[in-house]
């Protein structure tokens, strides 16, 4: 099989597909792992050698000693949370790699968190169900050119720039929501200076580092956050996050040419989950859904919220394949479906009497869609110790083949448990 030295890994559903686990798996062979979007709204759980770790901002390649991990310019960073996360990793891990941070990454401020909560309240029944980490307002400030970046802090005239952004946000809170923001400009300034001093040795021109790594034939892995259907442009808007989560953002969120990226792998669960509000045509509000939630431990690793559970949605995956340019997919959590008599795959939507094989653009239209299913028999045998495709029960083999056929995409492998070792990749390509 052809080998690639630049690989993008993205979630191809609504997040929590096991991207962290898969990034950690491929990172064993990576020289560089770059996170290119999102903030600490993400939560990735990684298991190996009996250890269990969780990362939110730090790339999931961090547990490999020889890997340099990069937080790219496309991310928004809560500096204090990042510092705390680094110190937990340094305390709890036997070994970990280096971490550098793009000087163009934006800083997520305390006022962004306050505004996130206020906007959610304002939306009432139409709330998004955000993680309340301030992600939307931080990206809004970036686009409004009111953002503060890491490269700004070191300048002697930084305070005047911060003052403009601070006053704008404080006025916004007061005038829009009658909220008196309690943290002073001075306190924010001092906190930023303190955080900057702690992180200073990591902050650099990451785009040049990553480009050189690819050109030197090093193995470079790009790690997406969230999932393709939470993409601000191509997801189920407005029930999305505030960044481009699709694979195409790997180049912009890192600062390298898209021409340097060789392969794009989508991670999918063997079923679907979604946290927060928004349309979910194949959602299971029944005992099967509850069982999948229990067996798959489907609770947000970040907010602890129960994840909504549904059947595998091939229409949604085809949309992700198109909008992210996926070359192939990897199926996680296959073990969770063990014991289900018949497994459904959503192959189309019916809306107002019309059959659709594409996702409608409007979230309300999508919410009105009824899923059209094909059904395939399930399996009863424990598959958590399976090491190859041939060892799977025939029904599980057929399920994977059916996904491949319906979605017209190659499956590169599957996983049967949370541990690094429970990962079955058919052929090495990285
Ligand atoms: P991410 O955000 O895409 O990195 O995914 P999360 O870490 O939020 O959620 C995926 C969850 O599924 C984590 O708790 C993983 O440990 C777990 N997981 C990953 N792969 C498998 C698998 O094949 N089987 C089972 N049972 N759990 C898995
Ligand atoms: P990982 O990387 C699942 C969801 C939130 C909410 C919407 C907007 O672990 O897959 P935000 O706080 O980003 O403004 O919330 O997006 N969301 C996620 N859902 N996994 C994630 O990350 C998510 N990050 C955000 O639940 O519906
Ligand atoms: Mg997650």
Image: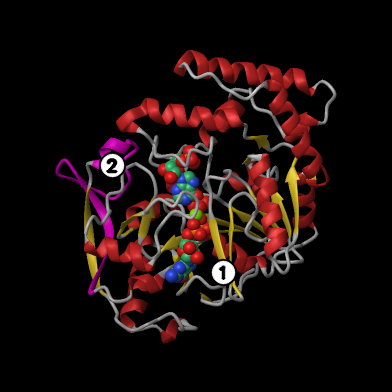
Furthest residue to the left? Answer: 353
Q: Position of residue 179 (x, y in %)?
A: 49, 19
Question: Which structural element holds mark 1?
Answer: strand
Q: Which residue occupies 45% across, 83% down?
A: 386
Residue position for label 1: 47
Residue 40 vertical placement versus 341 (above, below): above
Q: Which residue occupies 46% across, 37% down?
A: 233
- Earlier along the polypeptide chain: callout 2 or callout 1? 1
Residue 167 vertical placement versus 283 (above, below): above
Furthest residue to the right? Answer: 156
Q: Position of residue 264 (x, y in %)?
A: 56, 57
Mark 1 surroundings: few (<14), some (14-19) or many (≥20) residues within 10 A:
some
Does the residue tagged 1 have its C-beta within 8 Å of any atom of ligand 1? yes
Q: Which residue occupies 34% across, 37% down?
A: 361
CB contact under 8 Å: marks 2 and 1: no
Q: Please tell me the numbered disc located at residue 202.
A: none
Can the viewer see residue 164?
yes
> Which residues fall within the magenta stretch?
341-367
Q: Please tell me the numbered disc located at residue 366.
A: 2
């Amino acid at each position: 099989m052809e080998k690639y030295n630049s690989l993008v890994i993205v979630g191809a559903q609504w997040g929590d597909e096991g991207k962290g686990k898969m990034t950690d798996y491929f990172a064993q062979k990576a020289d560089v792992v770059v996170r290119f979007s999102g903030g600490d709204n993400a939560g990735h759980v990684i298991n190996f050698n009996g250890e269990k770790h969780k990362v939110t901002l730090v790339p999931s390649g961090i547990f490999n000693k020889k890997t340099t991990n990069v937080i790219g310019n496309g991310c928004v960073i809560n500096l204090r949370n990042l510092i705390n996360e680094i110190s937990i990793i340094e305390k709890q891990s036997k070994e970990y790699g280096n971490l550098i941070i793009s000087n163009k990454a934006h800083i997520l401020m305390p006022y962004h968190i306050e505004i996130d909560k206020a906007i959610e309240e304002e939306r009432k029944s139409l709330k998004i169900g955000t993680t309340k980490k301030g992600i939307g307002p931080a990206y809004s400030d970036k686009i409004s050119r009111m953002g503060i970046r890491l490269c700004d802090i070191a300048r002697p005239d930084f305070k005047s720039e911060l003052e403009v952004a601070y006053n704008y946000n404080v006025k916004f809170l007061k005038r829009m929501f009658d909220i008196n923001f309690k943290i002073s400009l001075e306190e924010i300034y001092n906190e930023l200076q303190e955080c900057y001093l702690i992180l200073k040795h990591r902050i650099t021109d990451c785009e040049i580092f990553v480009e050189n790594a690819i050109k030197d034939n090093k193995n470079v892995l790009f790690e997406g956050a969230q999932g393709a259907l939470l993409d601000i442009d191509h997801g189920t808007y407005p029930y999305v996050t505030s960044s481009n989560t699709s694979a195409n953002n790997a180049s912009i969120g890192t600062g390298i040419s898209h021409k340097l990226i060789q392969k794009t792998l989508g991670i999918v669960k063997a079923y679907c989950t979604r946290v927060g509000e928004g349309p979910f045509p194949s959602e299971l509000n029944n005992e099967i859904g509850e069982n999948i939630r229990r067996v798959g431990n489907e609770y947000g690793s970040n907010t602890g919220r129960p994840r909504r559970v549904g059947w595998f949605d091939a229409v949604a995956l085809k949309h992700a394949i198109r909008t992210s340019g996926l070359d192939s997919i990897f199926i996680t959590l296959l073990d969770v479906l063990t014991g289900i008599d018949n497994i459904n795959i959503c192959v189309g939507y019916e809306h107002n009497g019309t059959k659709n094989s594409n996702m409608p653009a409007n979230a309300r239209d999508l919410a009105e869609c009824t899923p059209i299913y094909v059904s395939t028999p399930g399996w009863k045998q424990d598959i958590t110790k399976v090491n190859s495709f041939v060892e799977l029960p025939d029904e599980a083999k057929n399920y994977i083949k059916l996904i491949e056929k319906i979605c017209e995409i190659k499956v590169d492998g599957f996983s049967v448990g949370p541990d690094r070792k429970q990962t079955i990749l058919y052929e090495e390509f990285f």
